[in-house]
Image: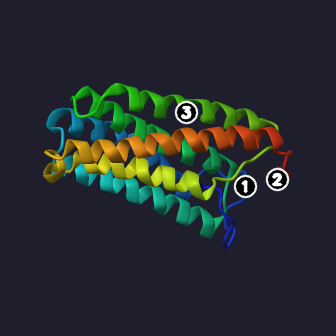
Amino acid sequence: MADTGAAGSGSFGPSALATPANAITVFRLLTTPLMVVLIARAGPSWSAVAAWFVLSCTDGLDGYLARRQGTTRSGAFLDPLADKICVLAAMGALVAVGRWWWPPVALIAARELIQTGLRYRLGRRGISIPATQWAKVKTWLQDMSVGAALLPWLAPHHAFVQAILWTAVVLTVVTGAQYLADSRHAAPAHVPA
């Protein structure tokens, strides 16, 4: 989840960089190549599932810590970026091993890149658009599609895995359009010093 929830105890201020939540986010970024190697070498396998599970769980952990210890501007930027890098790297590896076709992954990648650029531009103007409930469902479906594609016992059920992926694609495009619409009406928020 994004590192943008309400601050808990507030032990870290908004400009803090060295926080436990950010450390976990950086860990996720640094271990993503290991997951890609596991997918590239073994395709659907329990080792790839385990790597994906750890990366998915630590996504929730960094958001939890940020909400308890104080959200930061760096975390609000790094956490969603790490989410996108992890998901897109896994999806790209699944395309490379022939598990998925490239068009659905290209659609997801295009939306995520456009949204990341827009989020950065809006952030520089002091505008923050919180994730909607549907955007959270979209993230969950993307994660689930990767996990399903990596499970060895689901490997023979390609149509089922593709159905999850295409559902994630539809929701990714819809929530991307909603984000664009919301960004046109958003007003600058107070940005703490």
- Left or right for 182, reference 60: right
Q: Residue at image x 72%, y 59%?
A: 13
- Residue 14's label in the rendered image is 1
Crowd band around label 3 with a 10 angstrom C-alpha radius: few (<14), some (14–19), many (20+): some
Mark 3 element type: helix
Q: Mark 3 and mark 2: span between their CA atoms?
A: 29 Å
Residue 87 position within the rendered picture, expressed as x and y whole percent measured from the top left? 41, 41
Instruction: Name the residue tied to disc 2.
Output: 192
Tell me the amino acid under the disc marked 1.
Pro
Q: Is residue 85 left or right of residue 158?
A: right
Residue 113 drawn at (x, y percent): 56, 30
Amino acid under disc 3: Arg
Q: Is residue 178 left or right of residue 144?
A: right
Which mark sits nearer the N-terminus, 3 or 1?
1
Give the residue number, with chain letter if any, for mark 3. Answer: 111
**Secondary element at image label 2:** loop
Density class for disc 1 (Cα within 10 Å; few <14, some 14-19, many ≥20) is some
User: Measuring 35% from the left and 48% from the top, which residue is drawn there?
Assistant: 164
Q: For the residues marked 3 and 1, what is the alpha-carbon distance in whole angstroms?
A: 28 Å
Residue 111 % position (x, y): 55, 33
Label tally: 3
* Residue 86 quadrant: top left
- Which numbered disc, 3 or 1, marks the residue closer to the eye? 3
Helix, strand or loop under label 1: loop
The circle drawn on residue 159 is none
The amino acid type of the residue labelled 2 equals: Pro
- Which residue is rendered at x = 14% and y = 53% of the image? 153
